[in-house]
Image (spheres, rainbow, N blue to C red):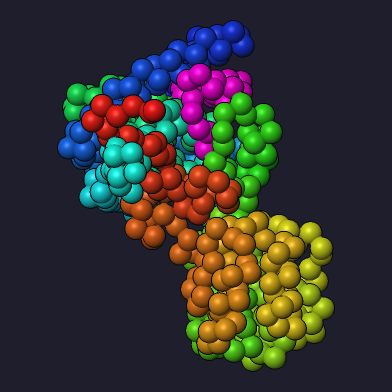
Amino acid sequence: MNTALNTQAVAATLATHEDVQQYMLSVGQAARQASYQLARISTQEKNAALAAIADQLQQQRAALVEANAQDLERGRANGLSEAMLDRLTLTDARIDSMIEGVLQIVELPDPIGTITDLHYRPEGFQLGKMRVPLGVIGIIYESRPNVTIDAAALCLKSGNATILRGGSEAIHSNQAIAACIQAGLAASGLPAEAVQVVKTTDRAAVGELISMPRYVDVIIPRGGKGLIERISAEARVPVIKHLDGICHVYIDDAADLEKAINVAYNAKTQRYGTCNTMETLLVAASVAEKVLPALAKQYQETGVELRGCAQTCALLPHVVQAATSEDWDTEYLAPILSIKVVSGLDEAIAHIRDHSSQHTDSIITENWSHARRFMAEVDSSSVMVNASTRLADGFVYGLGAEIGISTDKFHARGPVGLEGLTSQKYIVLGEGHIRN
């Protein structure tokens, strides 16, 4: 798979803005036509295509790693951060995870065509709701090439055509994955336009994609806050989004301290460059002296830089540097953690309300009344009790994979899996009924 040559060939034809417009218009039109075909295919046909795609990923492992190596080499040369390089890297384990994610989606129930709430109305006809695809989904993302396969598989299973626009830093990886997808679709007799990976790195393509309501039904951006703010501000198509992941763990005064240390350590260090990684640790003052020294030792051994409030600095002199006001609103995506000692549950909830991005927040406590208050009053897409924020993931939640996290309150919220990529319409079953 000579993905670099394919990419250069397409990019060379897009010399002007008009070329980009025409290219994206053709992509949108083809996606719309493909969506009509996908709306009528069976679950068995979808599953056969997904299995074929998973088989292609397995067969082309070496090509995927080779293409990814080109992106990593260029990323290092361009000064990408270690967190960004981590998000970009395709290891054997991550390829395994990609394949497993596709196969899990094969096993998931197909929501399309499901009829619920069917009941007779007094007039004698039946009324219900049918689950249907959204149509054409545009996905704009950065760094992580695994998003290409996760998004393609979820959209295909939910009956949607999809247009994928990855970042320029992953162009070789994304085109290699796209080749596997196209081969799987061809082997299954499904239209190639069901999944299209945009081949140009021209940023004007993003502007075109988010401005085609005739051909695109929903946009899902995944990436940095700047990207998502731009998409949200400029899109003429509905957007499912979250801006950033400023996630908190609060260690309550009624916490099991061994449990608290394990969860707080995992929430920060299991992986740094993800949106569900803890960025701020809140600790009740009554247990701070008992829990913070032990936690700080573990964080130091792992190389985590600690920034804290005045009380934290006093408890951990020479270990913690003073936090600034900006630290409480920063998604580090790096081995940096801000720590604040709070008086108790009320102050913890108030801090989260002021600084959380409404992604994922967790309380560690053995007091069920405190847990219930936290779940009721913290307004995030995932709220946890005695659990690491790293669990907020579509794969872990049993969705097979996720297309992103939504912190919106309409349509979809939290990890967006198959059902989040569908809508419902009313159906009426009559026997010649008319309205008098």
Please report the residue visible at 56 percent of the width from the left and 55 percent of the height from the top.
275
User: Left or right of 107: which side holds 277?
Assistant: right
Please report the residue visible at 61 percent of the width from the left and 26 percent of the height from the top.
236
Is 208 included in the stretch rendered in magenta?
yes
Q: Quadrant of the C terminus?
A: top left
Is 57 included in the stretch rendered in magenta?
no
User: Left or right of 354: which side holds 61?
Assistant: left
Q: Quadrant of the N terminus?
A: top left
Q: Nearer the viewer, residue 37 or 125?
A: 125
Occupied quadrant, residue 212: top right
Q: Measured along the vertical axis of the image, is residue 411 above or below residue 218? A: below
Q: Position of residue 262 (x, y in %)?
A: 50, 79
Please report the residue visible at 55 percent of the width from the left and 58 percent of the height from the top.
381
Q: Measured along the vertical axis of the image, is residue 15 above or below residue 426? A: above
Residue 101 appearing in the image:
yes
User: Left or right of 137: which side holds 66?
Assistant: left
The magenta span reads 198-221
User: Left or right of 339: which side holds 140?
Assistant: left
Q: Nearer the viewer, residue 301 or 407?
A: 407
Occupied quadrant, residue 31: top left
Please report the residue visible at 59 percent of the width from the left and 22 percent of the height from the top.
211
Q: Position of residue 257 (x, y in %)?
A: 55, 88
Occupied quadrant, residue 421: top left
